[in-house]
Structure formats: structure tokens, C-alpha cells
Amino acid sequence: DAGVIQSPRHEVTEMGQEVTLRCKPISGHNSLFWYRQTMMRGLELLIYFNNNVPIDDSGMPEDRFSAKMPNASFSTLKIQPSEPRDSAVYFCASSPGLAVHEQYFGPGTRLTVT
Amino acid sequence: GENVEQHPSTLSVQEGDSAVIKCTYSDSASNYFPWYKQELGKGPQLIIDIRSNVGEKKDQRIAVTLNKTAKHFSLHITETQPEDSAVYFCAASRVTGGGNKLTFGTGTQLKVEL
């Protein structure tokens, strides 16, 4: 079975550019989570969706970040404009449902903003 | 909000020895405690979890214990092997019908030496 799929795996961009990260959750999973991992702050939850609806975006750092889930099999995390401090590994995770405990992570996207 | 502390930050053991990683949490309403293993360049992988109605859970060489009164939980790995070398994260959440927000510890770099 395919796990969570993320693309691209690596992204290098210049400050001020728009960045779009993509995620395909495990088929049949109804909840999707976006995390950011840095050495300084560890693993942080940015936003999560249930049945394509954003439930909690309190972890989104600022207005430059936005996330969408147009359908059950696709989500995007967009940063516009990007800044060097956005450099991190961004993970997407999915879960069968909100009341289900287990979350399964994708391989991540390593973002470098120069 | 929830706060999870994890110790030690690094742990080096000889192959065949046991390894113990400890975490404490602050929110007494937390009811789900997973442990993740993250290998270099990969996403966190769920290896074991425990719910608040259980004091101990074991899966082959891995076990987790939970002390709700003291608000701490631990990961025990016995008969360590080189492939156990990775970063281990504990997490805590209060799973309700409205969501499952994982708060992660800062991670433990485990090195199993030959």
C-alpha cells in the first residue's frame, strides 16, 4: 500500500518567491496534518483538516502561509512570499479520522530559502 | 496548551543493552501517547503507542509504560541492535471527536554501538 506521498522532496528557492508543497494522503484517510520540523523548534503542527475542512490552523506562523485541501486525495501548503527563516522540513501526515489516534507521516519536503 | 519534555537528548548504548527514553507531559487531559522513530532523511514512523487506560504495552523488543499520576511515560528498547539507531520522539495528545493535536518532545538521538 502506498503511504503518504509528498512532492517535491527537495525545494530550493530564493527569498520572495512563492513555494507550493504538495501532499497525497493515504487512501481512505479523512484527516490530514501539516507539520514543520526545525532544529530550533522541533516538530510543530501547522494546520489540520478533517473531511477536507480546516479544523485548526492556530499553528500557522503568519499570513504568508496558507493551506488548502480541495479534495480527499490532495492538499497543498503555500508560502508566499518565502523567507530564509521558512527553511525547514515540512511533513504531511494522515489519519483515518479525527477520533482515531494514529497518524502516518510522509517522507517530507526539505525547503531551503536563500 | 500541552508541553512535552523528553530526556535524554542523546543516548549511546552497546549492542544488546537496553535503552530507556523518558517523557513528561503537562496536560492531565491528554489520553494518547505515541512514540515515533525517525531515520535520517525520512519521516517519523509510529512504532508504538499507549492510551491512558493502559499502564504498559509491549511489542517484541519495545515497551512503553505510562504513569498518569506523575504524568510521565517511557520507551524501553531491549536487546538493542544497530538498526535501532535513530531519533525517537514521544508525543501526547487529547484525542476527542474534534481533533487529535500531537505535541512532540524534542527528540532523543539513540546510537547503538557495535
Image (cartoon, rainbow, N blue to C red):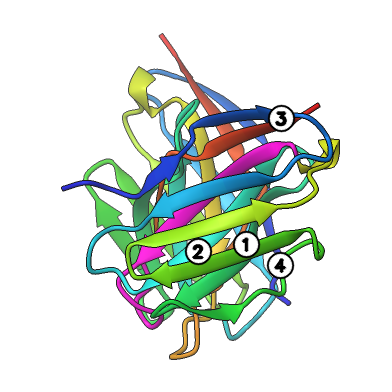
Q: Secondary structure at mark 4?
A: loop
Query: Would residue B51 be found to the left or right of residue B40 on screen?
Result: left
The magenta segment = A87-102
**Residue found 38% across the figure and 67% down from its top:** B50
Please tell me whether residue B112 belongs to the stretch shown in magenta. Answer: no
Q: Residues within 10 Å of mark 2 (few under 14, many from 20)?
A: many
Q: Where does residue B88 sit, x and y in percent of width and height?
A: 51, 41
Alpha carbon distance from label 2 to label 4:
11 Å
**Discs 3 and 1 lie in a common subunit:** yes
Q: Chain of mark 4?
A: A
Task: Please determine whether, in this image, residue A61 is positioned above or below residue B13.
Answer: below
Could you say which disc has been placed on residue A59 in the image?
4
Q: Which residue is mark 3?
A: A13
**Residue found 78% across the figure and 30% down from its top:** A14
Alpha carbon distance from label 4 to label 3:
23 Å
Q: Residues within 10 Å of mark 4 (few under 14, many from 20)?
A: some
Alpha carbon distance from label 2 to label 3:
24 Å
**Discs 4 and 3 lie in a common subunit:** yes
The answer to whether marks 4 and 1 mark residues whose Cβ atoms lie closer than 8 Å is yes
Q: Which residue is mark 2?
A: A33
